[in-house]
């Protein structure tokens, strides 16, 4: 009788141990953490919000951001970078456009200024060598409806203080002209500024500039 009881207890314990061992490796109510992919080659989750999302981690995006082009449309937009004028028989004709130029210089147009109105438009600059006794005549003719202003300076660092001649007398679409004779002992490099009387409509435009030296 006692032997039967021991046998049944042993049998019951064996069954409990069997189920206990199987539950340690598999439980249908717990997510299976094993995989049939031993190499772990499954596609990673790149849904929005994951750390692998290229929109959140720019290091995962192989396409670099384009570098903005900051090259000026014209290289002569400051007095220091003025384009050198080459005379041919004492004259030169220049065709240019200040529509996309920068605003480097603004003459005040105040009393004592070489020009009658402020020049807050776009600028282009040209340098020329003049000798004492030379007379230079500069005419800027706009080829669209905008109001040009022109001036002649000797110091790129002080345009207002070194301006020797200027003109902004006419209305939009009309040529402007300055005539200047170089005094004795004042020969050297002069800089021509083509500017604009500021308006809401235009701050510059295309033009022809005729230069005569005699």
Image: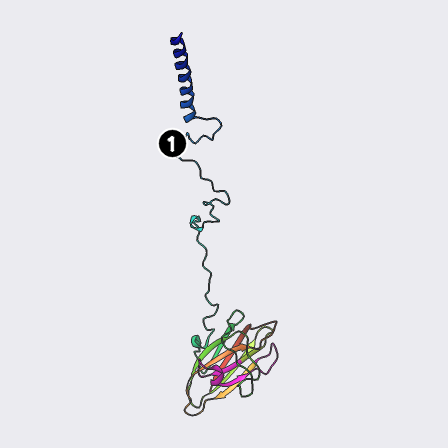
Q: Secondary structure at mark 1?
A: loop
Q: Is residue 161 visible?
A: yes
Q: Which residue is mark 1?
A: 38
- The foreground one among 91 and 81 is 81
Give the residue drawn at x 61%, y 79%. 171
Please give left or right for residue 187 compared with residue 49 in the image: left
Task: Work out which quarter of the rendered image holds the N terminus and state it.
Answer: top left
Side of 141 where 76 appears, left or right: left
Name the residue at 45% across, 59% down.
67
Residue 182, given in percent of the width and then of the height, sits at: 45, 89
The location of residue 62, given as percent across then percent down, is 43, 49
Q: What percent of the width, then of the height, locates residue 73?
A: 48, 68
Residue 59 highlighted magenta (yes or no): no
Residue 22 or residue 34, whichever sits in front? 22
Start-end of magenta stretch:
150-175
In the image, residue 72 sits, relative to residue 159, either above or below, namely: above
- Percent x, y of residue 212: 48, 83
């Amino acid at each position: 009788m006692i032997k039967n009881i021991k046998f049944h207890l042993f049998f019951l314990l064996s069954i409990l141990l069997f189920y206990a061992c199987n539950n340690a490796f598999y439980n249908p109510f717990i997510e299976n953490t094993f995989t049939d992919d031993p190499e772990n080659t499954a596609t990673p989750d790149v849904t929005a919000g994951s750390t692998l999302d290229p929109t959140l981690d720019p290091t995962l995006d192989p396409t670099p951001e384009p570098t903005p082009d900051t090259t000026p449309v014209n290289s002569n937009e400051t007095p220091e970078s003025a384009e050198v004028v080459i005379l041919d028989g004492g004259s030169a004709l220049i065709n240019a456009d200040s529509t996309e130029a920068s605003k480097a210089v603004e003459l005040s147009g105040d009393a004592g200024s070489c020009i009658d109105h402020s020049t807050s438009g776009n600028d282009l600059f040209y340098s020329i060598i003049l000798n004492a006794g030379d007379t230079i005549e500069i005419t800027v003719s706009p080829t669209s409806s905008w109001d040009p202003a022109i001036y002649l300076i000797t110091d790129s660092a002080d345009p207002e203080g070194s301006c020797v001649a200027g003109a902004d007398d006419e209305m939009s679409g009309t040529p402007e002209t300055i005539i200047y004779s170089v005094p004795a002992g004042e020969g050297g490099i002069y800089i021509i500024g083509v500017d604009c009387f500021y308006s809401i409509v235009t701050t510059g435009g295309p033009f022809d500039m005729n230069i005569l030296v005699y």
